[in-house]
Image: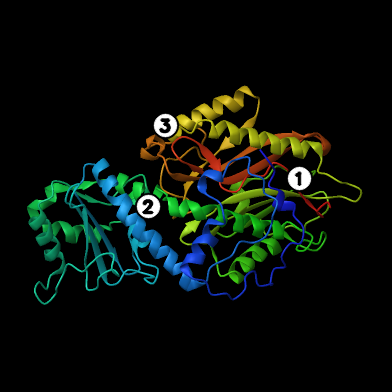
Amino acid sequence: MKTLEHLSGKNPTPLHTPLRAPLRRSLGALALALTFGSSLSGLTQAQELTDPTMPQILDLDDRAATIDRWLRERLDTLIAPLMRREGVDMWILVAGEYDEDPVVKTMLPATWLAARRTTIMIFHDRGEEAGVERMAVARYPVADLFPAAWNPEEQPDQWERVAEIIRERNPKAVAINTSEDFPLADGLSAGMRRKLERALGSLTERVVENHNLAIGWLETRTESEMAAYPQLVRIAHAIIAQMFSEATITPGITTTEDLRWHLRQHVSDLGLDTWFHPSVHVQRASQSAFSIANMSLDEGDVVMPGDFLHVDFGITYLRLNTDTQHHAYILRPGETEAPKGLRDGLAAANKVQDALLATFKSGRSGNEMLAEARRTIEAQGIKGTIYTHPLGLHGHGAGPGIGMWDNQGPMKGARGVYPLRPNTAWSIELNAEAPVPEWGDQQVRFMTEEDAFFDGETVRYLDGRQTEITLIPRQQ
């Protein structure tokens, strides 16, 4: 595996310098920009990354066009297979304005920042030939994706119109989004469910609680999304690389709190979003090992030579999310590399990554993958912790749970037994803990997180992984 060389590249971009020209592009040119001149099949784990240049970031209208194109593709290609896999011929999603079902939120066009009034979306599978019918039982059609199926002048009662549609189409199973184990699949509120059941009357017996539809929709990545996803990760890596540099960090003056807000400001200047407040922390000699539980209590340390830095950072762009954790070391006068104990510790974390990725096989549960990976690292004498999660339309995405930082045993409930499926993105999040001889055998935690894609056969990193500690100042 090659190093993330761009993390120590030259000429980092200053925080407030515009990172793209105010250039208008046609959608044809945008397609080339999004694929970055490479195909998904070329994104191998051994891909050499030598260019720290920030990829082109689209203007808002071009982002909207891309989001809507992807959304139409998702609706046209994912819904029918999911419903047939689950044996469901109707799926009803209900959202109130500002109280959207998480799934509904991902089905709204880019110009809809929230549902309007009560928005009821219905999928009806009419079979292989006719395909899936989409409709909105609402005051407004949902763009041209969900045609309006309710005329209030003819039927004043919105919920009664839902009942009419069900009687007209006579489905055997009507799925709703409720789940005790997956919050992202539990979008039907108690109040909306009561209204639905009152309207359906005896038809309520056809209603089935099915979280697999919601999870399947959220977790599955399309080819178009995956053509662009590596660039999202590259953007995040480029932002981290700029922060982990002498252009941003002045030892003895810069604090970790400065760096957290630096990341927030940089993301804002780029017109992007973060889905969580960035985390930057220090481990150093004569200081107890970093505590994940106390991350939010850290008010900031002044960064000094000899410090081992850690960042946890993610962006949201084109409705997709990234999640990355990397390390850097502040060189002491006369040093040209990080202490060997720190380098060995990162190598141990890379071995935990290898052990986990070796368990990725379709159909396996998160609990099975965790147990197998733990057996491997324990046989290697590595003290590691695995807490890996799906990634995509949400940072902590829908799908199997593979361990938790505070529980390395089997995960209870459906999350622990839900199967790994193809065409899913992952945040490979974990750590290794090891003594550093140069620090008097002090225990140090090496926390890594890299984004990856599982195609059903292989799993690969989207923009490489960190195998060498970033040095500050950077060595020429």
Above or below, 437 relative to 425: above
Q: Residue 68 location in percent, x, y?
A: 39, 65
The residue at the far right in this view is 334
Between 168 and 227, which is closer to the camera in this rendering? 227
Say the numbered circle drawn on residue 91: none
Element type at marker 3? Answer: loop
Closest to the camera, between mark 1 and mark 3, is 3
Query: Which circle, 2 or 3, is nearer the viewer?
Result: 3
Q: Is residue 117 left or right of residue 55?
A: left
The residue type indicated by label 3 comes to Arg
Q: Earlier in the sequence, mark 1 or mark 3?
A: 1
Q: CA distance from mark 1 to mark 3?
A: 40 Å
Question: Which element type, helix, strand or loop, lies under badge 1?
Answer: loop
> Which is nearer the eye, 147 or 170?
147
Q: Which residue is mark 1?
A: 287
Quadrant that contains the N terminus = top right
Q: Is residue 338 left or right of residue 194?
A: right
Which residue is identified by label 2? 184
The residue where tag 3 is placed is 364
Please tell me how crowded label 1 is: few (under 14), some (14-19), or many (20+) other residues with Cα within 10 Å.
few
Identity of the residue drawn at 61% across and 71% down: 269
In front of the other: 461 or 40: 40
Is residue 111 visible to the viewer in this orientation of the structure? yes
Q: Residue furthest top?
A: 379
Q: Residue at x 22, y 69 (%)?
A: 138
Tell me the kind of residue under disc 1.
Gln
